[in-house]
Amino acid sequence: MNILVLNSGSSSAKYRFYEMETEKCLCWGLVERIGSRGALMSHNRHDGNNLKKAIEIPDHAGAIESIIEVLLSPEHGVIEDKNNIDAIGHRVVHGGEKFSGSVLIDDEVMKQLYECIELAPLHNPHNIKGIMACREMLNDKPQVAVFDTAFHQGIPDYAYLYALPYSLYKKYGLRRYGFHGTSHRYVADRAAAMMDNPVENLKLITCHLGNGCSIAAVKNGVSIDTSMGFTPVEGLIMGTRCGDIDPAALLYIMSREDLGNSEANSLINKHSGLYGISGLSNDMREIESEALAGNSRAEVALDMFCYRIRKYIGAYAFAMGGVDGIVFTGGIGENSYEVRTRTLNELKLLNIELDPEKNKNRDTSERFIDFGRGVRTMVIPTNEELVIARDSIELIQG
Ligand code: ADP
């Protein structure tokens, strides 16, 4: 069985193609700048046969067409016939309260996906375009939607509601949804395997630290709280997003600086976070090297970033009534010794004792980074695409 995994964004489509008997990724790639001049396709085959070319891609249908074309290409491809694609798994950002798990897409699901657009107007329409294009080009093939929000649907009402008038929750669905759910689910399962204990027995805190950052409390395999909220702006400090702030501070800035909605939106999404504090960059590598070279704004940005994670770890340990393991994943979580050290070093309360060697090790595979005496701490590279492929197989096999 072969599964094509698609992640359709506003101007790009990422893909991975899996052979599921071995779970091997046969090829992967990216079509970028869809709809503008200079669209580009990068394709990588598992044996190192790679391709990068400029192509005309007017829309998402064109992107899917070129992906199918390259999968079939005698020179760079991995299959001989369209029929070798058994199903397509799509990453869908927002499933609202309608979806608490992955689903096979049919007309009723399509209708509900359209209804979720108002919750994620910048993301869901593009995910839907990818699905529609596949329906057109691979119309007899089953398609599966895997939602970023689904894993967090286990969060209880006292944790997902905001203390705003309840009527706004009823009217607009205004509540915490959380994101990165596929990643939190994957690393929680892997952590349980590493700890040789079923996930149903464990209290885990999973830190997904990439350009977007979120943290989740996973109790007995269920997400019971997470830091991103109604939108992915809430919670941790991120590359360019502010995370938690006093909502009245935003109203104050809007009034003092005479900002409209879209400018305010851009302020908290694109000009804040590591970039806003440091004035340098949204890239953790640059923040770290500047901080270590003595730049005080980079230093405070790094400290704020780690302090915010530490506060959440403390909160979630108490929310779950304990914690057995803490996982770091995402580009920063997997690679940054500095962030893991600054975040965990002061967590003596949890008996965490990092092993500097294991922590510093540049190994990219999953590993423990402690001496194994207290709460276990781990680095686990995330693999959202594999989860999408696995869910797709599970659903099409009934
Ligand atoms: P996305 O959320 O877009 O998938 P990633 O998970 O790839 O992003 O994470 C990107 C972040 O990871 C960037 O801030 C980048 O600086 C950081 N990062 C990547 N490699 C390292 C490294 N060696 N040390 C510190 N940070 C790193």
Image (cartoon, rainbow, N blue to C red):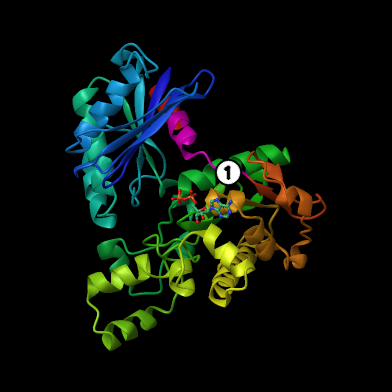
Instruction: Name the residue nearer the viewer: 284 or 229.
Output: 284
Q: Is residue 6 above or below residue 158?
A: above
**Residue at 54 percent of width and 64 percent of height:** 287
Q: Is residue 233 left or right of residue 121?
A: right
Whether residue 170 is visible, yes or no, is yes
Mark 1 residue crowding within 10 angstroms, few (<14) / some (14–19) / many (20+) = many
Image x and y of residue 16, in percent = 41, 30
Q: Is residue 88 left or right of residue 179?
A: left
Image x and y of residue 119, in percent = 28, 56
Residue type at tag 1: Val
Instruction: Name the residue nearer the viewer: 189 or 269.
Output: 269
Q: Is residue 185 magenta?
A: no
Q: Is residue 386 magenta?
A: yes
Q: Is residue 39 above or below residue 141?
A: below
The residue that disc 1 covers is: 187
The N terminus: image quadrant = top left
Extent of the magenta region: 380-390
**Residue at 58 percent of width and 42 percent of height:** 381
**Residue at 63 percent of width and 41 percent of height:** 364
Image x and y of residue 140, in percent = 24, 19
Quarter of the figure with residue 268: bottom left
**Residue at 47 percent of width and 65 percent of height:** 158
Whether residue 225 is visible, yes or no, is no
Image x and y of residue 389, in percent = 44, 30
Q: Secondary structure at mark 1?
A: helix
The C terminus: image quadrant = top left
Tell me which secondary structure the magenta stretch mostly adopts: helix
